[in-house]
Image (cartoon, rainbow, N blue to C red):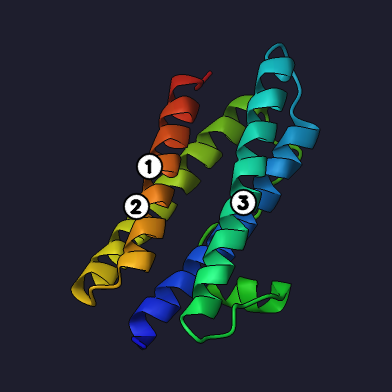
Amino acid sequence: MNTDLYQAFARLLADTYTLYLKTQNYHWHVRGPYFKTLHLMFEEQYLQLATAIDSLAERILTMGQTAPATFAKFNELRRIQEGDSQKKAEQMVSELCEDHQLLLQDLYKALKLAQEQNDEGSANLLSDRIAEHEKTHWMLKASAL
């Protein structure tokens, strides 16, 4: 088991969980003329992230490791910042767009590690996550107000 790959997955899990919580926060608190559109889009996104959280954690367990599973541990590992429910809708969209881009950077690095180790299970999961985050990033960028 490569420690670097485990650490990459642990960070991805922490950031994905933080992004899940942030997206749900924005789903609850978005306001303004685009409320309904953004409210529904954010809901779709946080539901997808919930599935991703489970997949990442299970992959870590498949590697024979323990998945980080506390807010304290997530706070140590994460790079994505928590959301501020007082932000304007356009700020919410912009922040989420940037967060998906940040996750993509880490996903590409993790994919390279998995490929170097011929870890097809991890590589497949990471490729699927990359496709999902690329699509979400595009949708958020296209929705910028």
Callouts 1 and 2 close, C-beta under 8 Å: yes
Q: Quadrant of residue 137?
A: top left
Q: Residue at x 59, y 26 (%)?
A: 90
* Residue bearing mark 2: 127
Is residue 108 visible in the rendered image? The answer is: yes
Q: Earlier in the sequence, mark 3 or mark 1?
A: 3
Residue 71 versus residue 144 in the image, above or below: below
* Residue bearing mark 3: 51
Which SS class for mark 3? helix
Label 1 neighbour load within 10 Å: few <14, some 14-19, many 20+: few
Residue 114, given in percent of the width and then of the height, sits at 29, 70
* Residue bearing mark 1: 131
Dot 1 amino acid type: Ala
Distance in Å between CA atoms under marks 1 and 2: 6 Å
Dot 2 amino acid type: Ser
Label 3 neighbour load within 10 Å: few <14, some 14-19, many 20+: few
